Image (spheres, grey):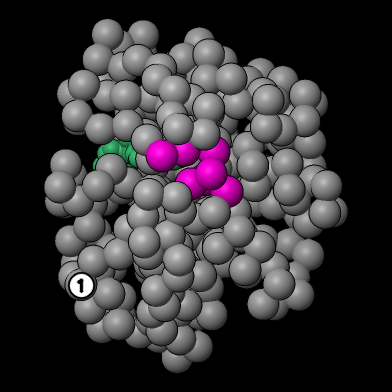
Amino acid sequence: MSLMNPELKIVTTADGSNTIYSSAVGENYHSKHGALQESKHVFLNSGLKYYLDSYASNSVKILEIGFGTGLNFLLSADYCIKDRVHLDYTGVEAYPLTKEMISQTGYDEYVSFAIWKSFLNHYPDALKTSVQINNCQLKIAHCRLMDFSSEAQYDVIYFDAFAAIHQPEMWDEEAIAHTVQFLKPRGVFVTYAITGNLKRTLKMLGFKVEKAPGAPGKREMLRAVKCANAE
Ligand SMILES: C[S@@+](CC[C@H](N)C(=O)[O-])C[C@H]1O[C@@H](n2cnc3c(N)ncnc32)[C@H](O)[C@@H]1O
């Protein structure tokens, strides 16, 4: 996938918010039942807010696998700025979208004008270094998940890969073990899907796994908390 790629086009989902359809993958970047609803329900509410409420914290480090359009970052940054929470956010993205493509998503409607402008301005630099977006730190690691490495340990992981039917290698034991090594003990892993394999893998890796109600169009999603003594 490259920039201004003819394989990518903007499409509208059931809640009126846009997503990107990739004909190379054969899938949308978000749920067809509602991109905004999914992002808010799975990542913002069940991930970020759950973490902040559970630990009464005023700072959070988030790692997102599959940064894509940046919708999850934008909603998280908007929430953290309004709630005076310090946010340090790292996205991992193998095929970054162009700034032009992101600017056509219409996601400016869902966050403050200042965040949207600052995000668009800093997006190209965020692919190379850490940037400051109104009090939030953002860095996008331009690499494949299995090539991502970091000294940092995160509080929350947003796992937003394409579905296993399209990209099974993102969901196998090796990929999940690689991902969760970057999560702190008591940290929270959330994703929009739930499968027997994923539950088994996370339990084996020392997680307490919970089925949570899914976003519109999905009965359930998965949230897992890393046990204090997990490696
Ligand atoms: C379901 S979409 C993510 C949507 C994104 N979170 C958003 O809000 O726009 C999956 C993302 O994973 C990226 N991706 C695909 N293979 C990858 C890999 N091996 N490592 C990292 N990212 C990958 C895709 O380019 C795409 O942006």
Q: Is residue 6 left or right of residue 137?
A: left
Q: In front: 152, or 184?
A: 184
Assess whether residue 117 is covered by the magenta stretch: no
Q: How many marks?
A: 1
Residue at image point 45% right, 32% down: 14
Residue 103 in picture, x, y percent from top left: 56, 15
Q: Nearer the viewer, residue 220 or 110?
A: 220
Q: From this view, report whether residue 164 is shown above or below residue 111.
A: below
Secondary structure, magenta segment, majority class = helix
Residue closer to the observer: 168 or 42: 42
Residue 136 seen anywhere in this rendered image of the structure: no
Residue drawn at x 77%, y 30% as measured from the top left: 112
Q: At numbered mark 1, what does the secondary structure look like: helix, strand or loop? A: helix
Q: Is residue 192 left or right of residue 82?
A: left
Boundaries of the magenta span: 33-40
Say which of 201 and 12 sits in front: 12
Q: Quadrant of the N terminus?
A: top left
Residue of label 1 = 196
Magenta stretch holds residue 37: yes
* Residue pictured at 30% horizontal, 82% vertical: 203
Residue at the image point whose x is 45% and y is 91% from the top: 229
Q: Is residue 84 visible?
A: yes
